[in-house]
Image (tube, rainbow, N blue to C red):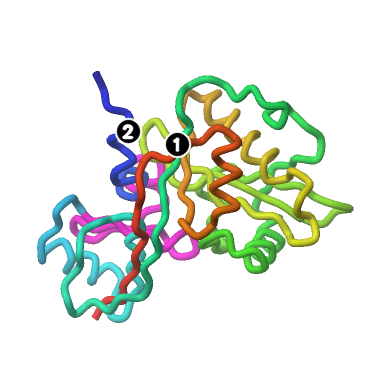
Amino acid sequence: MVNREAALEDPVGESLRGHHARLARRFGRAATYLPGVATFCAVPADPGPAEWADLSRLLGPGGFADMFSCPATPPPDWEPVFVLEGRQMIWPGDGRPDHPWAEPVTGVVELGADSVPEMLDLAGRTRPGPFWSRTHELGTYLGVRDNGTLVAMAGERLRPPGWTEISAVCTAPEARGRGHAARLVGALVARVLARGERPFLHVAETNTGAITLYERLGFTTREPVTFRGFRTP
């Protein structure tokens, strides 16, 4: 029996080798995303000095190595930048969500390249996680507008085989409490399930409000993860 969850052990590497190969840049056995798309990096499981040297060469001196949830430890001369405790959450099965927020609703729009300035502004004000000028190329992004102004969004990020990560879930402070996040996540869940994949997501352990929301919508915690970033020598 195929273990579908195995791909979630290395979601960045699996995405860069597969669905996001067109957005990858590589050196040797190391990979990362193109500039402006994402900063996440990947090395093989149990990397040795040669693999870390490949990543260092790929990023250049003083480059930012965002290792996401990779547990491997880089060489001691790599400068730690951040450590953040979080969790990986998954949709528990292949069934379609049966909540009202999963039904088609007016006001939810698909966001494209012409919406990037607004998306960057909203992400900058709400800080849902890394979001750059080309992040929208990773997948579908949906939004809610209020009198023409983008006030909420959510989209697809990592794409390991059989899975799609929901990310960049955020709502402007003045528009909170109206159910926008639930509607957007529900719409994305329905899209992911419709193409035969399962949704998953990552959330910081300190973001208790988001964890409560995701649990209410039907997600369950798969495992704790530690997000880490380093600077190459």
Q: Which is nearer the eye, 150 or 209?
A: 209
**Residue bearing mark 1:** 90
Which residue is depicted at the point 47% across and 57% down? 204
**Secondary element at tag 2:** helix
Which residue is depicted at the point 52% across and 20% down? 95
Residues under numbered marks 1 and 2 in contact, where contact means CB atoms less than 8 Å apart: yes
Amino acid carrying label 1: it is Ile
Would you say 205 lies left or right of 181 here?
left
**Secondary element at tag 1:** strand
Q: Which is nearer the eye, 55 or 27?
A: 55
Would you say 6 lies left or right of 179 here?
left
Q: Where is residue 76 in the image (x, y as percent from the top left)?
A: 17, 76
Q: Position of residue 132 (x, y in %)?
A: 54, 63
**Residue bearing mark 2:** 5
Identity of the residue furthest to the left in this view: 49
Tell me which label, 1 or 2, sits earlier in the chain: 2
Per the rendered image, the range of residues in magenta is 16-43
The C terminus sits in image quarter: bottom left
The N terminus sits in image quarter: top left
Which residue is depicted at the point 38% across and 59% down? 40
Which residue is depicted at the point 85% across and 53% down? 148
Would you say 207 lies left or right of 122 here?
left
Q: Position of residue 160 (x, y in %)?
A: 37, 39
